[in-house]
Image (spheres, grey):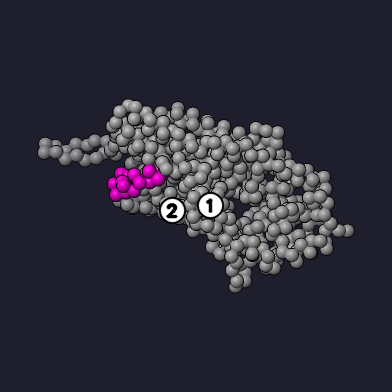
Amino acid sequence: MERVRLDTHAHVCYAPRLVRTGDFQTPPSNALHLPWAPLLLVGGGAWLLRVAGFFHRGGALGYPVDYDEGVYFSAAALLSHGVLPYRDYFFVHPPGVALLWAPVAALTRVVDAATAFSVARWFVPVLGALSAVLCGRIAQSHWGTRAGIVAALVYAVHPEAAATERGFFLEPLLNLTCLGMAWVLLLPATGRRSWRQDAGAGVLLATACAIKLTAGVWVLAVVWALCLGGEGRRAVRVIGTAALTGLIWLGPFLVLAAEPMLEGLLRFQVMRPPDGELSTARRLLTMLGESHWGGALLSLLGLAVALGRLRRRDAVAERLFSAAWLLTVAAFLSAKSYWGQYNAGLAPAAALLSGLGASQLLLRAERHSRRFAAAVTLAVGLAALSALPVALRSANQRERGLLAIGGSIRAAVPPDAPLCAFEPAWAIAAGRLPGLPVGSPALVDPYGLMLNDALDGPSRFASAAAAFADDRTQRTVLPMLARCDALVLLGRGEWQLSAASERWVDEHFTRDGDVWKRKP
């Protein structure tokens, strides 16, 4: 236990360092024995909300499958077949998502890709439930049990978090890893245990960055939170461990394919054409309003409280989460591309700040009458759960065409025939993976591959759609299509292929329903 020196006129004595838990202070030993039951109850509800999207005739594969999910699952599954990102196909993300999901996606060696994807999708809601519990535990340990319950509730019903935690997105792993890092970093410890915790936090921080590059905002937040509290040595330990761990994550791929890896992770991300929602005002409204106004209000209140405590030495948690929130918002507003699902990456910091804001609001309400305090408590509860209707509507969505496309591919294309699909999920629904059989064109991410080719010239494009109209985007993909016996274009392929490329397809392939077959 850390001891604090107390000098008096008579003697020198020591007292245990105190940890703030809301309205009062308790020693660390007591903070570690706060109740888990309400947080586990919320975590169970978060899991049910996420798996609710799978309870229908189509099962887990009947819930909408995003383009990105197909890319990430394919990358993870191909690892078990010896097909590596960067070396064997173009990949624009760090390798963490492929490596971490590889043990689950390796089911494709036992069953077909569609079955493996459906089974593996059931694992993702568990990550969301754990993240909700961790949000609650961190807030509870620092600001009291009421703050913990509110933080857990806000995360549990966060619409974008709930939606992405039904599929193979980056955010489920990213959020859990960042929350795990924060939990380890903020635990009270001294001596060797403190060193071990800082090392553990560094490992988790590097893992988050190996999942998604935007986790870099948490690196800056950690440095800010520790250094402003006079704990520069801790910051050095955490960041130093993260740097070494990052070499372990990235080193093997850099050795095997340094140039394509750097091209995908750096050049593409910096120079890519804009896509998605381009309006800054609309991005901000999507983050702070619309589907989660109640949580946003609590988050902004918590942000104001955290900023008010900025220079307090012991306010490490407040500095960490306020910085993470502000930097994440800034990153989303300045990003070349933005879609609503990205808001899931804001959910951890937003939920924790909501817990802080709610705890302060309830504390002030208790200074008035019981009736007033009860009314404020009810209002806080309604605000925390304001996004629940939107999250429930999201769970009721159904994938209307994927299973039919998969069936068409199964019927029209032999299993050993090379197939090129412009949506990896189409091939997955047919029980196939891009690049298999080994030697087939590994068209894992045709969107990223084609936009990357657009960067080779001096001109820049106002949007991804404008880039696809340029012949440079067709340079790599056309030779790959020429090696395929069957193509699946549909809307995405027609969008990404130029007019000249579509004429080439007409000359060499014949359409049979959803599938284009090579002419004899």
Residue 467 locus on image (x, y percent): 64, 64
Near mark 1 (Cα within 10 A), the count class, few <14, some 14-19 or many ≥20, is: many
Using the rendered image of the protein, determine whether residue 377 is visible from the camera's viewpoint. yes
Near mark 2 (Cα within 10 A), the count class, few <14, some 14-19 or many ≥20, is: some
Marks 1/2: CA–CA distance: 15 Å
In front of the other: 112 or 495: 495
Residue 145 locus on image (x, y percent): 38, 32
For the point 34% across and 44% down, which residue is it?
A: 305
**In this view, 237 is above or below 259:** above
In front of the other: 394 or 80: 394
Q: Quadrant of the C terminus?
A: bottom right
For the point 61% across and 42% down, which residue is it?
A: 167
For the point 59% across and 58% down, which residue is it?
A: 275
What mark, if any, has residue 432 been given in the picture?
Answer: none
364 sits to left or right of 36: left
Q: Does the segment drawn in magenta span residue 308?
A: yes
Element type where label 1 sits in the image: loop
**In this view, 338 is above or below 470:** above
Magenta-highlighted residues: 299-315
Q: Nearer the viewer, mark 1 or mark 2?
A: 2
Tell me the residue that label 1 is attached to.
212
What's the residue type where badge 1 is placed? Lys
Q: Does the segment drawn in magenta span residue 503?
A: no
What mark, if any, has residue 327 been given in the picture?
Answer: 2
89 sits to left or right of 280: right
Mark 1–mark 2 CB contact (< 8 Å): no
Badge 1 or badge 2: first in the primary sequence? 1
In front of the other: 350 or 257: 350
Residue 193 locus on image (x, y percent): 37, 41
